[in-house]
Image (cartoon, grey):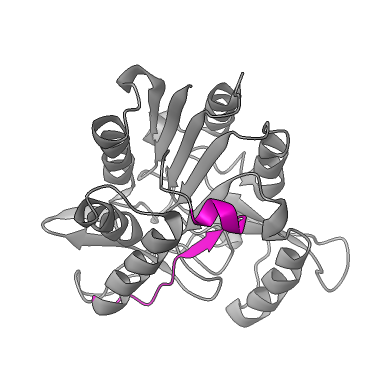
């Protein structure tokens, strides 16, 4: 049985005023957790940080992660970065959009959800793939500095207009996202996905305990530690939502995938 992971963290977005602070720390934190407590061999846990995390390198890393996967293998992909969306502008009223991860070289390249879905579609039965996205890959969400922790509040929202593409008001985008989701039911997902928040919320890049983290990542790892590393995906989603609410973060992480996968122990 193989155990492999790819952990991506991007703080630096050249040419913008939208740099983040906690993404690289997130990548290191997930990698350390997987090696120390879930028996992933350190050489098989790959890190892509800042300028390493180009679109080509991320996609190549994912292809390497998935290559030769067999039933029983445990694969993990974590991504901490900005997220955005790309509208279908072929009509006057857009009726479709693609969610996207924002790599280091985002001005030339985005990683669309369709590309990720294509990579995961042929995953052999019995392969256990976990995707953790502490970046929001719907258009209304990105990471932001938590106002309760780092005054003054400053949103770090990488909207499509940052790279010359059209964007929408949050309310209109949320309705569009609802239609988009209907075409991709959770029952068809090969992977289990824990993402940062709902479409109408922001994920936060926060200073906690003197260092920066993604708030979802920080409290997810705290919940895992408190459970002595024995926790299901459904339990983890519930606990991290409780913790974020208790700390005043207006973000609601979402767990997506088949019900049987939600009930599994994490990373096994």
Q: Please state if 35 lies on the left or on the right of 53 as rendered.
A: left
Give the magenta-colored segment's residue range.
247-263
Identify the residue at the far right of this view.
Answer: 91
Q: Residue at x 31, y 28 (%)?
A: 39
**Number of numbered discs visible in the structure rendering:** 0
Residue drawn where x is 44% and y is 42% of the image: 78
Question: Where in the figure is residue 42, as x and y percent of width and height?
Answer: 31, 22
Q: Is residue 261 magenta?
A: yes
- 212 horizontally vs 79: left or right: left
Q: Position of residue 257 (x, y in %)?
A: 60, 55
Residue placed most toward the observer, 248 or 155: 248
Q: Quadrant of the C terminus?
A: top left
Q: State the image quarter where residue 117 is shown.
A: top right
Residue 161 location, quadrant: bottom right
Asked if residue 166 is positioned above or below residue 247 in the image, the reply reads above
| Residue found at the very far left of the displayed protein | 210
Q: Is residue 51 magenta?
A: no
In the picture provided, is 156 more to the left or to the right than 229? right
Q: Residue 34: x, y in percent?
A: 32, 35
Position of 116 with respect to 237 (left or right) is: right
Q: Nearer the viewer, residue 260 or 192?
A: 260
Place of residue 225 in the rendered image (x, y in percent of width and height, measured from the top left): 22, 51
Q: Relative to the observer, which residue lies in front, 235 or 150?
A: 235
Residue for point 39% across, 68% down: 238
């Amino acid at each position: 049985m193989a155990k492999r992971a790819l952990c991506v963290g991007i703080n630096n977005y050249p040419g913008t005023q939208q740099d983040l602070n906690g993404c690289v720390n997130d990548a290191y934190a997930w990698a350390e957790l997987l090696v120390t407590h879930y028996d992933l061999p350190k050489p098989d846990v790959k890190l892509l940080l800042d300028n390493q995390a180009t679109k080509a390198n991320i996609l190549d890393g994912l292809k390497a992660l998935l290559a030769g996967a067999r039933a029983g293998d445990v694969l993990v992909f974590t991504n901490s970065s900005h997220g955005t969306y790309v509208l279908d502008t072929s009509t006057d009223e857009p009726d479709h959009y693609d969610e996207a991860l924002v790599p280091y070289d985002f001005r030339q390249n985005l990683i669309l959800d369709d590309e990720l879905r294509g990579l995961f579609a042929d995953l052999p039965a019995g392969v256990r793939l976990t995707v953790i996205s502490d970046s929001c890959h719907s258009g209304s969400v990105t990471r932001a500095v938590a106002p309760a922790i780092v005054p003054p509040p400053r949103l770090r929202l990488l909207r499509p207009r940052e790279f010359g593409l059209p964007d929408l008001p949050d309310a209109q985008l949320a309705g569009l996202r609802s239609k988009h989701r209907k075409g991709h039911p959770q029952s068809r997902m090969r992977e289990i996905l824990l993402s940062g928040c709902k479409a109408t919320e922001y994920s936060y890049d926060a200073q906690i305990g003197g260092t920066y983290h993604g708030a979802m990542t920080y409290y997810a790892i705290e919940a895992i530690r408190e459970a002595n590393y024995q926790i299901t995906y459904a339990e983890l989603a519930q606990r991290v939502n409780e913790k974020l609410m208790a700390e005043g973060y207006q973000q609601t992480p979402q767990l997506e995938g088949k019900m049987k996968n939600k009930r599994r122990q994490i990373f096994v």
